[in-house]
Image: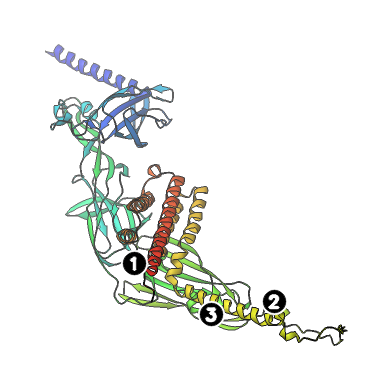
Amino acid sequence: MKTSKRHHIFSRLTLLLGLLLCVQAAVAAPGVELRVDPASRSGAIEVGQKFYIKVIVSDISETPATPSNIPGAKLQYFGHQSSSSSIVSVNGQTTQKVVNIYAMTLKAEKKGTFSFGPITVGGVKSNTVSYTISEAGSAPQGGAAAAAPAANPADPTAAAQQGPTFIGKGNDRLFLRANISKTTAYEQEALVYTVKLYTTYGSIKFIGATDAPKFDGFVIEESSNVSNQLSYETYQGRTYATAIIARYIIFPQMAGELKIIGNKYTVSTDAEEYYHDPFFSQLTVRKPIQLNVTPNDLTVKVNPLPSPRPANFSGGVGKFTISSKLPSADAVANQAGSVSYLVTGEGNLKYIHLPDLNALYPEQIEVFSPTTDVKTVVGSSNVSGSINFDYSFMPMEAGTFTLPPVELVYFNPQTGRYETSVSKEYTLKVARGAESAKSQAAQVYNTRLMPVTLASSASPRPWVRGFAYWLWFIIPAILLGLALIGRRRYLEIHADVEGLRSRRAGKMARRRLKKAMHCIRTSNEDGFYDEMLRAIWGYLADKLKLPTSELNRENVSQILSDSGIPSSGIDSLVTLLDECEYAKYSPASARKPMQEVYDEGAGVLNTLEEEFAKAAKTKNETKNGEQNDDPII
């Protein structure tokens, strides 16, 4: 009996030593392993679905290269997913094993059975994996997971080999909540949209957005003010570790109930599983899981701005002040000067415009379109900063003129009223220019009589009867009439501010596209998409004579359709706007090349400009034809 018991103890010790030696050998040897992980619970891969190929690198410091071709699938993302390390000590010899896991996110495109691999990392070759892609909707209801044999829960090795588990919208240990600062707001009022992570897991390995939230009817600014570390919060009687993983400042563009649809996030973590073994006693195994989590949707009730709106409303919603700067109060006729107006505050700064200075300034001073410089900072609760309007002007006459104060009328959502900020008033002294001084110079009169010789046969004729004499009166009269006609035409053109903006819409769009091209040369992607959106929306606002509060896709599409623009051009415009706005918050790998987006934008604007010209020409021809058909009385 004692011998049998000793033999049993010896057998268990031998088995333990063998296991430890195997573990040491496995830890010491570097290796590369490929593993296919379907995204669906069924385990099947269908055309159009996502799936993953994991690259498990052991004890190799090098990073796997991004694969250029995956048979039957398209690579959407490749990056580091997680890492782990373990230490094994046998007979005084300690060995450390470091494992890094890299994940390829793939989209199945072709039906069939494919193989991938081997790949080489640090001189070590991997295995080859095979996977089968079936037609969409052809997977059995039970799924491959139902047909597979169940793992023995008492076997930790089998549990670890099951791979990541995908869980729909989260579970009671990890979920997302979306919040908004106000559920009732005014048009163009800044709102804060946040996504907060709640978890009771010990560690989070990876958080990434797999698609973008849908802000239909909003203009968005993404804030970098998110959580850098976890904090703790009690929610529904349970304590969670929390972190704000996304924050947006959003501006509603239309009245009504607007819905915000949450986007999907992929979260990787480890779940602890406990097993009881008669030899090892209590054993804890960390099992990787991957959760595709979506926050809740939200609805915002947007109220229109109070009516009636002031005639000189700037389009600003927030809190703003205006200041001005005149570099010199002395000017010279026919020489350019400058004056600038600086608007600072919080709110929709990018959409503020000032009144037409040609209508405010004396008619002897011509003011040109301003150059704007926008500097904004997206904070945790609003967008703040400044916008500088730099105007050039030209005094046409000498004298003393008053530059009146400029009023900035904006809507303050905190008080619910329209408020006004006023700049300074200036007195401008304009001296005569160089040409005026010459014209005023004293003329020296020559009193010396010129000799006159008349032929005896010529009859004297007064000079006033000659045609050359009357030309001195006819020519100035004609020039004066042309000047009056030109002046009247100039005043008519500049009196119609919206018409002038519409005619200059193409010119302003070209200026903004030049700024976008500069961003391409400097590889400034964020600035490029801002400039492209500013060029497109600015062109539409000027061409269609729309205020900022009415500038949205629905109004623009309706007006373009009523103006005779083909539906193909309207669809191209809406698609371009969606691509630019999507690129602002999508990862760099998902964005189209900037040059391609620039070419599309220039093509769309050129097409619209041509269609507007055709529509105007057709309208004029129709009008002339109707006039020619009138009977002659």
Q: Earlier in the sequence, mark 1 or mark 2?
A: 2
Residue 619 falls in image quadrant: bottom left
Front one among 611 and 276: 611
Residue position for label 3: 363
Looking at the image, residue 203 lies above or below residue 332: above
Task: For marks 3 and 1, give the one nearer the viewer.
Answer: 3
> Farthest residue in the front direction?
457
Looking at the image, residue 539 lies above or below residue 595: below
Front one among 355 and 469: 469
Looking at the image, residue 92 lies above or below residue 398: above
Task: For marks 1 and 2, give the one nearer the viewer.
Answer: 2
Determine the residue positioned at 77% across, 86% down.
461
Residue position for label 1: 549
State the count of labels: 3
> Farthest residue in the left direction?
1
Residue 435's disc is 2
Q: Residues within 10 Å of mark 3 (few under 14, many from 20)?
A: some
Name the quadrant of the C terminus: bottom left
Disc 1 marks a residue whose amino acid type is: Ser
**Mark 1 touches mark 2? (CB < 8 Å):** no
Determine the residue positioned at 43% across, 50% down.
603
Q: Does residue 556 appear anywhere in the picture? A: yes
Q: Indicate the secondary structure of the residue bearing disc 3.
A: loop
Q: CA distance from mark 1 to mark 2?
A: 48 Å
Disc 2 marks a residue whose amino acid type is: Glu
Could you tell me residue 120's position as x and y percent? 41, 24
Q: Indicate the secondary structure of the residue bearing disc 1.
A: helix
Looking at the image, residue 133 lies above or below residue 515: above
Front one among 212 and 604: 604
